Amino acid sequence: MKIWLFAEILEKELFLSYPIPTQEIRIPLLKEKGIRLAIRRLDQVHDLVSGNKFFKLKYNLEEAKKEGLDTLLTFGGAFSNHIHATAAAAKKEGFKSIGIIRGEETFPLNPTLSFAKSEGMYMEYVSREDYRKKTEDFFIHGLKEKFGDFYLIPEGGTNTLAIRGTKEILTAEDQGYTHIGCSIGTGGTFAGLADRIESKQHLFGFSSLKGEFIQQELQSLLDLYQISPKGKYRIFDNYHFGGYGKFKPELIEFIHWFYSQTLIPLDPIYTGKMMFGIFDLIANDNFEKGSHILAIHTGGLQGIAGFNQRFGTELPL
């Protein structure tokens, strides 16, 4: 199936024309080390259905239409990029949407949840204990008894159709890159990229979650979807800055510095940590001279407003 088909099936206004911008980064350290670095700007793929969520959602929405369902149901935390994108995509494509939100409802709503509500998403708040049961059959059955039939999209959007979409982030024109870098949350983007890299390419994933468990979790994901990468891959679990949603002053400083050099905003949950990791590896000579790196900007910029509000930071949007 051509990448254009989804745009033909759904409302064309939801999608921008390809190719997605890829921006070359010119910073003295790169010249000093003899390395080239470019960023694929998925944050610019759509103003609302942004970043990797664009690719994760597109075939899922197509499938929901094929099944004749008019409601999307998914899961996420209070600052979830996935909740934000699903609410926007559902409204544009004429679906009703339901978000099962981890934790208690708190007023005023943060910018992410306020936006989702404005897009028509009905939000059901559940305790963290109940939220952990979200993949269990009895929990899903209870939701169907309450809400009726719906098309289920898992937390973070990662499933077979999502990976089918994220494979399209890389194209045949990208074979000249020696290294591909991406952030890791639920792993759907990493898995799609892993399925597309060529034999001479290296895929570097930067986990935003604390713990070595991510190594086995990602391997299990690749096994589940029968993905055997042609090239090599490596997962870095030491750039999480304390864990998911956590940060340290040096991360905030780096994001400000990077913006001052490139005018590219990074979010502190995913892309900021990835880019910090890439520059740390470059500075410590972990890339051979002549390497050409492609970093995938997976979006997530919508969460910056809520982050600034919550922590009193002034990260650029």
Image (spheres, grey):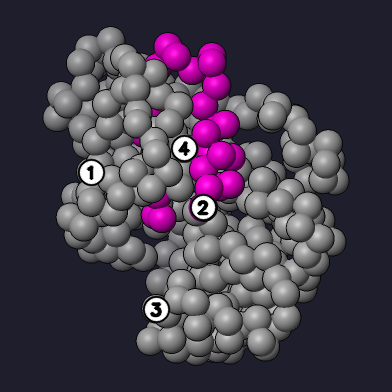
Query: Disc 4 versus disc 3: distance between alpha carbons?
Result: 25 Å
Q: Amino acid at mark 4?
A: Gly
The picture places residue 122, in percent across and down from the top left corner, at 70, 79
Query: Disc 1 versus disc 4: distance between alpha carbons?
Result: 17 Å
Q: Which residue is mark 3?
A: 132
For this rendering, which residue is in front, 137 or 32?
137
In this rendering, would 62 be left or right of 218?
right
Q: Earlier in the sequence, mark 1 or mark 3?
A: 3
Query: Disc 3 versus disc 2: distance between alpha carbons?
Result: 18 Å
Q: Which residue is mark 4?
A: 192
Residue for point 83% across, 41% down: 9
Q: Earlier in the sequence, mark 1 or mark 4?
A: 4
Q: Which residue is mark 1?
A: 236
What segment is highlighted magenta in the picture?
159-187
Q: Which residue is mark 2?
A: 159
Query: Disc 1 versus disc 2: distance between alpha carbons?
Result: 23 Å
